[in-house]
Amino acid sequence: MDLSGIHFMMPTPFNDDGSVDEDSIASLIECSLNAGCTGVVCLGIMGEAVRLSDEERRRVVQRVTREAAGRLTVTVGTTAPGMELAVRQSVEAQQLGADAVMAAPPPVTKQNLETVFAYFHGIAASTDIDLVVQDHPVESGVFMPPVFIQRLSEQIENVHWLKLEERPTPSKVTAVKQLTEGKLGIFGGLGGVFLLEELARGACGTMT
């Protein structure tokens, strides 16, 4: 699956009573197509995934994959506090038709990259679709140095993509590209603030 390009980080639409507004998901997909996006990402930070029940998550993914089928790639956010939950959500996303899943490290109080590696390995081993590693330390509290990202790329088969959001992103794009010899596709984020610089450094697109 080639995910290169521009991906819309979808918000989850809600009704006034707090329930998920599933019909508006169709409008968001059309908006993405009209804007020239190549894919959408649902249930990320922008999608307020932590506010949704398991059933609501399932219905969102079902509607997004149905509306986007054959027109946009669908990446589903499956970040979770622990590996078991992340695995369960990733397996469900694949079963519902997602093209890829995206996960950030689980929030931790003490840096432990071996635990982070096991977390990503567990997600990847449970699915047959690509895993986008989200590098967003402001949110997760986990700092992944370029050499660790190289290890993920080399030792975990489904890791072909990185969403890089550690400032300053341009210099880290260059460092990761050099270590992975260009084999890892790198997306920017952060509202597109560094988009042009990231593309100049070799990024394959953005998820924002």
Image: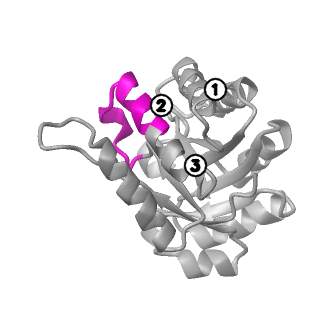
Circle nearer the viewer, 1 or 3: 3
Q: Between marks 2 and 1, how big is the CA–CA gap?
A: 10 Å
On screen, 19 above or below 82?
A: below
Q: Residue furthest top?
A: 84
Residue pictured at 44% horizontal, 45% vertical: 44
Residue with the mark numbered 2: 108
Discs 2, 1 touching: Cβ within 8 Å: yes
Name the image quarter holding residue 102.
top right
Residue with the mark numbered 1: 115
Q: Residue furthest left?
A: 17
Question: Is 187 covered by the magenta stretch?
Answer: no
The residue stretch that appears in magenta: 45-62
Q: Can you give x and y, in whole percent of width and height, for residue 159 in the image?
A: 75, 43
Question: Is 56 covered by the magenta stretch?
Answer: yes
- Crowd rating for badge 3 (residues with CA inside 10 Å; few <14, some 14–19, many 20+): many
N-terminal-most mark, 1 or 3:
3
Residue pictured at 58% horizontal, 82% vertical: 196
- Determine which of the numbered discs, if any, sits on residue 74 in the image: 3
Name the image quarter holding residue 72.
bottom right
In depth, the one of 106 and 6 nearer the eye is 6
Q: Is residue 94 left or right of residue 19?
A: right
Q: Between marks 3 and 2, how big is the CA–CA gap?
A: 28 Å
SS assignment at label 3: strand
Discs 1, 3 touching: Cβ within 8 Å: no
